[in-house]
Image (cartoon, grey):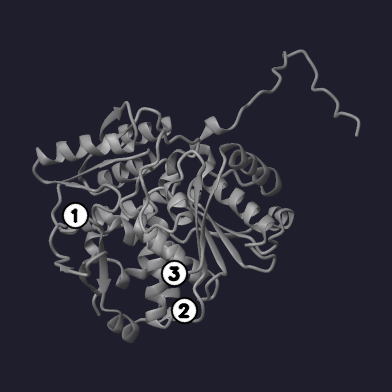
């Protein structure tokens, strides 16, 4: 039995085939390449029962992942994050069946570890010596850590306003790190120029290599498996580059072809912040691609992507599943971050909180129904964003007393 049923790569616009066993970037059309598998072979040799008997990490789905030899797998135990019921918060917003896929418990504290694990593993297998990327913080931190695990070098450039903890993760893992006085697109131009002057490096910017997406799609496989190989009614996802949403949609289509998933696909919701909402605007205008968003800014730094390379794939996933795209304000997402922590004890990242705010608003509008089995993706741990919480509490002298609780 083969470890991976990887067959080839396809251009996501033209369908042209590319060799999966060469280091690849984007297609000749300048758009992402998508990994394809011999799903007939997988269906004939693997069952959901076989999957259930495997270790609880994302590599349990190795037949539909691109690493051909298990010896090349680079892992820190990523995957199989919990699907948590949120009964108190869900009831409060009118969605009592609300579930949260909590990626804050994955290595490096965000879902970016999934893409890094698979992307670095495949790069290692193909003989890449170093990886290079622009990042809003968390992806760069994850790729730096996994590159270190694989004994590869890493070159990372991030905006100077990126979360400070992500700088520390890069530095401690030995990455070559640069801060850029601009946005992620500005960092990307510098990285591309640097890679052109270095041998053995691969640029692994969002969707400029095919395998980060494959790691992210495992969220879709896990959600289906955790629900007894059934799809929920709705999945809300915070979309910057949108790789996770594209990946989840890809996983859903693969599982349906494999016969592991029956019935309708979930309605996919792309959630953005009002301060950077190019995909929401394109969706509202009926366009297939977005326009660069001017003066992009939001406290949800991970989704500050003014123009995503794969925006047309995000829009396709949303429309093909009869989903929607919605933007929320920073004030609303921060309010829901605090409310969820008070009601459920879950301190989530601002990007995940944006999805909570979106769920609340979609329920209020009637788009989300009370009986919908709804899954919200929390893409990272709130403790990676301490600046989102203002701590203004009393300081007591050692000889003082803690006040009695207020009456009532």
Vertical position of residue 302 compared to residue 71: above or below? above
Whether residue 57 is visible: no
> In x, y percent, where is residue 223?
50, 66
Image quadrant assignment for residue 123: bottom left
Q: Please indicate whether residue 193 sits to the left or right of residue 222 in the image.
A: left
Left/right of residue 352 with respect to residue 73 in the rendered view: right
The reply to whether dot 2 and dot 3 touch (C-beta < 8 Å) is no
Q: Is residue 109 visible?
A: yes
Q: CA distance from mark 1 to mark 2?
A: 31 Å
* Quadrant including the N terminus: bottom left
Q: State the image quarter where residue 335 is shown.
A: top right
Q: Label 3's element? A: helix
Q: Which mark is residue 154?
A: none
- Label whose residue precedes the other's in the sequence (1 or 2): 1
Task: Give neighbour class at mark 3: few <14, some 14-19, many 20+ (Cα, 10 Å).
Answer: few
Residue 215's x, y, as percent?
Answer: 34, 59
Q: Is residue 60 above or below residue 179?
A: below
Of residues 287 and 392, the one drawn nearer to the viewer in this rendering? 287
Question: Do the residues bearing badges 3 and 1 touch, measured as CB atoms within 8 Å?
Answer: no
- Label 3: which residue? 320
Tell me which label, 2 or 3, sits earlier in the chain. 2
Please count the marks in the image: 3
The tag on residue 25 is: 1
Extreme-front residue of the structure:
285
Mark 3 or mark 1: which comes first in sequence?
1
Residue located beneath label 2 in the image: 261
Q: Position of residue 144 (x, y in %)?
A: 29, 42
Eye-nearest disc, 1 or 2: 1
For the point 74% across and 53% down, the residue is 92
Q: Please name the residue shown 8% across and 43% down the image.
A: 199
Residue at the bottom extreme?
44
């Amino acid at each position: 039995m083969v470890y991976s049923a990887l067959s080839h790569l396809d251009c996501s616009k033209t369908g042209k085939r590319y060799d999966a066993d060469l280091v690849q970037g984007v297609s000749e059309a300048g758009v992402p390449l998508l990994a394809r598998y011999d799903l007939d072979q997988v269906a004939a040799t693997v069952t959901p029962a076989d999957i259930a008997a495997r270790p609880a990490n994302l590599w349990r789905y190795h037949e539909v992942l691109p690493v051909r030899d298990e010896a090349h797998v680079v892992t820190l135990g990523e995957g199989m994050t919990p699907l948590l019921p949120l009964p108190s918060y869900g009831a409060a917003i009118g969605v009592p069946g609300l579930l949260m896929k909590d990626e804050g418990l994955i290595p490096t504290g965000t879902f970016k570890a999934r893409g890094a694990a698979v992307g670095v593993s495949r790069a290692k297998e193909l003989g890449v010596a170093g990886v290079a990327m622009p990042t809003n913080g968390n992806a760069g931190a994850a790729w730096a850590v996994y590159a270190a695990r694989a004994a590869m070098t890493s070159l990372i450039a991030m905006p100077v306003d990126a979360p400070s903890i992500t700088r520390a993760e890069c530095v401690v893992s030995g990455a070559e790190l640069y801060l850029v006085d601009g946005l992620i697109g500005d960092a990307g131009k510098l990285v591309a120029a640097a890679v052109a002057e270095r041998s053995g490096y691969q640029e692994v910017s969002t969707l400029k290599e095919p395998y980060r997406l494959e790691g992210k799609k495992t969220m879709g496989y896990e959600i289906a498996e955790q629900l007894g190989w059934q799809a929920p009614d709705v999945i809300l996802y915070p979309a910057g580059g949108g790789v996770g949403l594209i990946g989840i949609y890809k996983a859903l289509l693969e599982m349906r072809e494999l016969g592991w998933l029956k019935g309708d696909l979930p309605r996919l919701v792309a959630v953005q912040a009002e301060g950077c909402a190019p995909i929401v605007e394109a969706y509202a205008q009926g366009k297939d691609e977005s326009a660069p968003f001017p003066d992009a800014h939001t406290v949800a730094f991970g989704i500050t992507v003014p123009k995503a390379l794969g925006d047309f794939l995000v829009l396709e996933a949303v429309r093909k599943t009869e989903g929607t795209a919605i933007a929320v304000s920073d004030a609303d997402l921060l309010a829901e971050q605090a409310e969820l922590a008070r009601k459920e004890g879950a301190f989530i990242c601002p990007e995940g909180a944006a999805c909570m705010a979106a769920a609340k608003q979609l329920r209020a509008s009637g788009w989300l129904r009370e009986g919908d089995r709804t899954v919200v993706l929390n893409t990272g741990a709130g403790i990676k964003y301490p600046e989102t919480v203002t701590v203004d509490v009393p300081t007591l002298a050692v000889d003082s007393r803690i006040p009695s609780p207020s009456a009532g």
